[in-house]
Amino acid sequence: MPTIPSYLQDATMSLDDKVLGVTSSDGLTTKTYSLSSIQSLFSTSGVLATIENSETLQNKTMNFSTGGNNTLIADAVDVIFDNAGTNILALDVQAAIEELDNEMAAVESNKVDTSTYTTGLAAKQDKVSVDEVEVTSSLSIEALSSGSAYIVNAAGGSIVVTVTDVANSAKSIGDFIEFHIKNISNLVSFTTSGVQQLYARETELTSLGYLKLTKIANNEWSLG
């Protein structure tokens, strides 16, 4: 009987090719087994492969969508995480999850409680003085009372309202002053001095109406 090394090597294999083997029932009966039947056995038995060493699969698809309850179980620490293009330093899934969890906890602990500010601002907005004083010349807002309304009348000349560092020290966050623009025959404008910042759609007024100047933060004011 020829020995195995004496047979020619089949360079092109197909699923119809066969191999020799013995049955498991008696361990004696010799039979042939096609490669397609071996493939089918692995597929229906649910066994893909059992290896002790690592194996790299490239451009392969593992399809679990052919019915049944399929589960892929792996320790997160053993799953490699590609952190390219992210700010995450972790190199495995478990470490990445823990890193994100720590960052979320840090964000939560650094949240600013704005309830005191918004409550105080609402209270101030409910206390507008109804006694309107007429403004006919330029001035700095430290001369004006918070929570009051003023009539701006530029019939006699230009009026410049200036937000100053002194006003910033004198007034609290949430303090406001209302202006009723009654006459703009001459220029009416709002400006700042020192380190004050004013956020407004326009600082040189072109129409009549009402404006509210509010201190929204230290050295920061809004006009609208």
Image: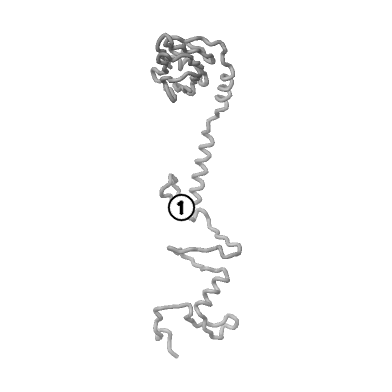
**Image quadrant where one finds the N terminus:** bottom left
**30 lies above or below 94:** below
Task: Name which residue lies at 39% across and 20% down.
Answer: 195
Q: Percent position (x, y) of residue 201?
A: 44, 25
The residue lying toward the viewer, choosing from 208 and 137, is 208
**199 lies above or below 187:** below
Q: Residue furthest bottom?
A: 1
User: Where on the picture, by quarter, is residue 116?
Assistant: top right
Is residue 164 among the parts visible in the rendering?
no
- Amino acid type at image mark 1: Phe
Is residue 157 among the parts visible in the rendering?
yes
User: Where on the picture, by quarter, is residue 123?
Assistant: top right
The residue lying toward the viewer, choosing from 37 and 81, is 37
**16 lies above or below 68:** below
Task: Name which residue lies at 54% across and 72% down.
Answer: 42
Q: Secondary structure at mark 1?
A: loop
Task: Name which residue lies at 47% across and 22% down.
Answer: 223
